[in-house]
Image (cartoon, rainbow, N blue to C red):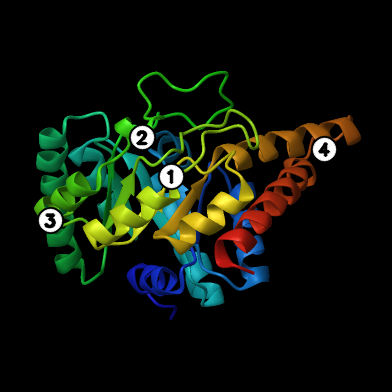
Amino acid sequence: MPKNLRQIIEEADKKGVAIGHFNISDIAALKAIFEAARELGVPVVIGVSEGEREFIDIHEAVALVKGLREEYDYPIYLNADHTYSLEKVKEAVGAGVDSVIFDGAKLSLAENIAKTKEVVEYVKGEAKKQGRDILVEAELGYIGTSSKILKEIPEGAATKKEDFTKPEEASQFVKETGIDLLAPAVGSIHGMLGMGLDPDLDIELIAEIRKACGIPLVLHGGSGLKDEEFVKAAQNGMAIIHINTEIRKAWREGIEASLRNNPEEIAPYKLLPGAVDAVRAVVANRLKLFSGL
């Protein structure tokens, strides 16, 4: 059996590379992501947000990812992305995810610490009962919420250095909550303004936060960032990088191309390969950057 997610993250962190985290809503995207990762021989994390879980169903997502991991003896894992309540955390953990993100980024520091600590205590208790290692990630610093093409930066999102996550607060947050992974605000935003048009990352701050908090970091809002920023982010402490908007865009463009090229076709299995090919190309490109290949 492959190593567990914690071991994979620790290895990436030591090497100064990052694991790709890509969200799905259907089997076409999962197929594309898995094929890209397997072809390159790198581990990968599949993400499902609350909205995506409502559509694909968390139990089905767990079964699909677990099935691929066991059939191919491959390091592919499932993360319950952006979860906003303990109730939804319980649902995801009960279904069998490998990790869960509690998103209290819009809360005050004190509220975020209190609610995150409650989530950590619950998840670690359940992990012990299940005999599994379930990771808990939390967010510190608001960077927006949507994974779509944006016309402007989300209201309230941290885009200036004074609004970014502070190393001393990150250290306090980790010590008081006991989380395994931290997603700080360091310049990226959820969603995408356009390739190369999103705000720049504060690489120096990433290194400072990693040193201060002592645990691997996670970069959210990776879509639209410059290629070199991914490499620098991984080298300075970002052990996981999230991409969603880019592959949603690729999925749609792939479907549209299939429909244009096959105007009479109605069989989904003959149309969806267009989406698979488009998503696989984006994922492969990102995984090469993240892994230093």
Residue located farthest toward the bottom when viewing the structure as drawn: 1
Is the Cβ of the residue at disc 3 closer than 8 Å to that at disc 2? no
Q: Earlier in the sequence, mark 4 or mark 2?
A: 2
Give the label on residue 202, or none. 1
Tally of marks: 4
Q: Is residue 96 visible?
A: no
Q: Which residue is tagged 2?
A: 161
Q: Left or right: 14 with respect to 43?
A: left
**Quarter occupied by residue 144:** top left
Amino acid carrying label 4: it is Ser
Image: 278 above or below 2: above
Whole-angstrom CA distance, mark 3 to mark 1, is 23 Å
Residue 73 spot, x, y in % from top left: 51, 77
Amino acid carrying label 1: it is Asp
Whole-angstrom CA distance, mark 1 to mark 4, is 40 Å
Q: Earlier in the sequence, mark 3 or mark 1?
A: 3
Q: Which residue is tagged 3?
A: 175
